[in-house]
Image (cartoon, rainbow, N blue to C red):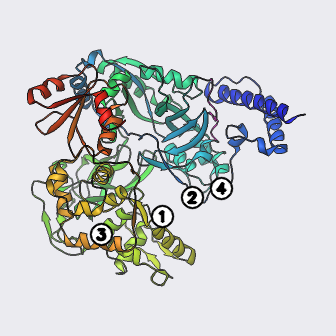
Amino acid sequence: MSTKNIKNDLKKLKTKINLLNHKYYVLDEPEVSDYDFDILFKKLLSIEEAHPELITEDSPSQRVGSKPLSKFESVIHKEQMLSLNNVFHSSDLKLYMERTQKILGIKYDDLKFSVEPKLDGLAINLLYINGVLDVAATRGDGTTGENVTNNIKTIGSIPLKLIGKSYPETLEVRGEVFISKKGFQDINAKNNEKKFANPRNAAAGSLRQLDSKVVAKRPLDAFFYTIGYCSPKINIKTQEELLKKLSNWGFKICSLNEIVIGQNGCETYYNNIASTRNDIPYEIDGIVYKVNSLDYQDELGAVSRAPRWAIAHKFPAEEKTTIIKNVRFQVGRTGVLTPVASLEPVEVGGVIVSNATLHNMDEVIKKNINIGDKVKIRRAGDVIPEIISVVEKNKKSKKIKFPEKCPECGSSVEKVEDMAFIKCVNKYKCPAQKKGSIIHFVSKKAMDMQGIGDKLIARLVDEGIINNSSDLYKLNEDNLRNFVINTTVREDTGKEYDITLGEKSIKNILDSINSKKKVNLSNFIYSLGINEVGEVTARNLAIKFKKMDNIFNADYDQFINLKDIGPVAARNIYNFFREKNNIDNINSILESGIKFIDKDKNITNLLNNQIYVITGKLKKFSRQKLSENIIKNGGNVSNSVSKKTYALILGDDPGSKLEKAEKLGVKIINEEDFYKIIKL
């Protein structure tokens, strides 16, 4: 048989198997028996074994797993993956509806929403080039995730090649990977050693396996609900149309999606799903409401990392009762003392809970909590355990009191004015603050130094080997060799850790530190742990100032005029770069050979730090994309018109912002003319 005929036969066979997979995994409509499918699959493997040069990325054979990876590579998403803000009560939802109504000028009772269960899984981004799966990545920090392509290919419900021909050349598709309740039970039944706490942990743990052949044996599934970057743009008007389009391309869509009207429609759907939650075959932790109109979505835009056009209505967390055995005060990296209750262990939401935060002393007084009380607890947002209320008082209970000295260093503590907490004043010498600062510095979203865990940092600080983040760059084989990590027996767990660092661990630690000599400026700024400076603010600072020297020399007004930076954050940033200890630490890090990667090479100062406001429906870009372009060109974006506004960018059907801009004499630029200014 000629090579051309073999190629044609292989193409038909791959198409046939991919369609059978789609019917089996996505539509739940198997067309052939397992035996007949196995015959087709063995035929495919036989041809590819004889002609390995004909194996392609979209071949069904690529689902069986490949060689294990040594680590996951980073992937930058073409368009940022946003997270959702949450509401927990009807009153919170009403406030969200009122804000939406104010921006759109449409009564929320008349507004259509696309609603769906909120899966308790792991967010994923799939990039397709010419219809073939090219890269799959985890959400990560929303901008950069981990490359899990080999693992994603093992999931039968995810198309390796899109169905039909009407898909864009370049397409990002977003969804959620999960494991069903039954799949979770099956995994734990087969695993005689470590048991997963819940299906989400099982899904996340499976997807982060370095060996995709292990992943192929896990019952992973996925639902998809939106797209990211898309070129060329697709002509659709609603979220409902988008879901149909995704389904037509071969993606699995949640069958419980509906279109409802207004807050009443949203809450009716919420109550219906909540009442049948236990019967749903996969775990959900709430409902997502999305404004159905894509034009309205563009008009609503996004704030920081969350869209205004969508909100998650979370289910109440599971609650249990237990006894408070003791209370200790935990010192954070900013010096704040947080009361933490040691509890009689109790299972909440599939996790054994033995500690719970008491937040601050105002909360303790308000809830009248004492040591020895029987209390009701829950996992807040299904994550952090917290005490809701006292169920039963104990006659022998002890009052919880603020310590007069820092429990970590014995220094004085002070009450922060107008705040409900106290702080250790020994800012640069308190071991807990040192440890917290260094732990933050090496964390994934900061410098991402692998293999340098909390316990290792704690012991290095306790031994006086390191005192700040710059000391990490002074570590060597001599001061790490035969290093032993010991922690005292903890009352809450009864565990003692005793870990010796071997030669391989030492090499990995030093390699990890040295591998981070080239970093993004935004990651470095975030790693410094400045109060009120998260990832988004750090990115804005990096884009605006471009160099550390520029930040050192900036005044307060330059910070306060930046997007998303208020008076408190601006003051914190300004003060941080005026403190000698901080300056010395940063200079020491820079002297170790740190170089900054210019990931935004085309950033200009074209807009000269001027403030812009956007109104109306845009034709070329979403509001978020236009805002990013304004920032990249040296401008700032505000949501409201004021005397500080330099110009109003005008789209179709502008709202009340136009009238206000005219009253204040603010410059008005239409959308097309603005694109010419920034050369888009």
Residue 160, how many percent across, how many down?
Answer: 64, 35
Q: Amino acid at mark 1?
A: Gln
Which badge, 1 or 2, comes first in the chain's sequence?
A: 2
Q: Amino acid at mark 4?
A: Pro
Q: Residue furthest bottom?
A: 478
Label 4 SS: loop
Q: Amino acid at mark 3?
A: Ile
Q: Are marks 1 and 2 in contact (CB under 8 Å)?
A: yes
Q: Quadrant of the C terminus?
A: top left
Q: Which residue is mark 3?
A: 586
Q: Residues within 10 Å of mark 3 (few under 14, many from 20)?
A: some
Label 3 SS: helix
Residue 68 is tagged as 4
Q: Which residues are magenta?
A: 154-165
Q: Residues within 10 Å of mark 4 (few under 14, many from 20)?
A: few
Rendered residue at 20%/55% (across/down): 360
Residue 80 is tagged as none
